[in-house]
Image: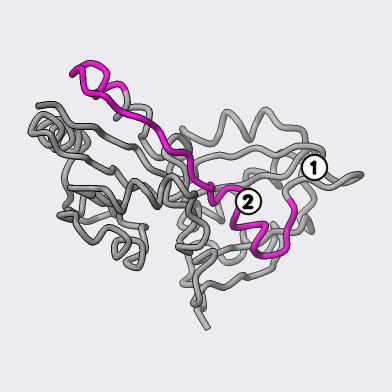
Amino acid sequence: MTGFVSLVGAGPGDPELLTVRALRRLRDADLVLNDALVHADLLELAPKAQRFYVGKRAGRHSIDQAGIHQLMIRAARRGQRVVRLKAGDPFVLGRGGEEALALEAAGIAYEVVPGLSSATAAPLLAGIPVTHRGIASGFAVISGHAEAAYAPILDGIAPGAMTLVVLMGVKLRGEIAGRLVARGWPAATPAALLFGASRPDGFTQLTTLAGLVASGGDELATD
């Protein structure tokens, strides 16, 4: 027997922002492999499924990507309906492409269920449009994990040419903002730090590039 794997985008957290297809896949699932940022309420939408946490958090031991691939493949070969539940959209900085390739190579039937990415949903929920006529005609999304990931993109964008959305960039916010200022972006350029988009405990801090540089690696207030 061969099962089926659904690479499902969980959206920014609020269960009401799931797609109808994502909800159906969760209700029918035999096994859910969920990421660290997936809200616990979403797991309650899979009442029949065994749940297995496969999240990755900085500085903490976790299952590696190859191990996740093997869990999906083995479960599917046992005839199970597997939901790989990923925060946001599976193909936006979520390693969904790697998982699709692994399933393809193993001959496992699968689908990708798009999710609402926090790259656009978080600013929207905070009242910040990523494009606005006369101000920004486009936007770029980058990973803020490491300089090697974001530097080539930041260095190639003219100051003020578009909105920049940095995912997973809180730790290096000072370095990223400083790089932009050094490249000619005005220090007074508006900036925002967004946390827990769509969740009751979510909050927004409005600042500027200069404010981000000054805050550097300081701890952020959460109240």
Residue stretch rendered in magenta on the structure: 101-129
Of all residues, the one furthest to the bottom in this rendering is 223
161 left or right of 153? Answer: right
Numbered circles on residues, count: 2
Q: Residue at x 51, y 78 (%)?
A: 221
Colouring style: one colour
**Residue density around tag 2, few if under 14, some if 14–19, many if 20 or more, within 10 Å:** many
Q: Secondary structure at mark 1?
A: loop
Q: Say which amino acid is labelled 2.
A: Ala
Foreground pick, 17 / 63: 17
Image coordinates of residue 61 in percent, x first then y, are 16, 53
Q: Residue at x 49, y 69 (%)?
A: 218
Q: Is residue 108 magenta?
A: yes
Against 14, residue 172 (above or below) is: above
Q: Which mark is residue 177?
A: 2
For marks 2 and 1, the one nearer the N-term is 1
11 left or right of 59? Answer: right
Foreground pick, 48 / 151: 48
Against 219, residue 172 (above or below) is: above
| Cα distance in 3D space between marks 2 and 1 | 13 Å
**Residue density around tag 1, few if under 14, some if 14–19, many if 20 or more, within 10 Å:** some
Q: Say which amino acid is labelled 1.
A: Gly
Image coordinates of residue 35 in percent, x first then y, are 30, 51
| Residue underneath mark 1 | 160
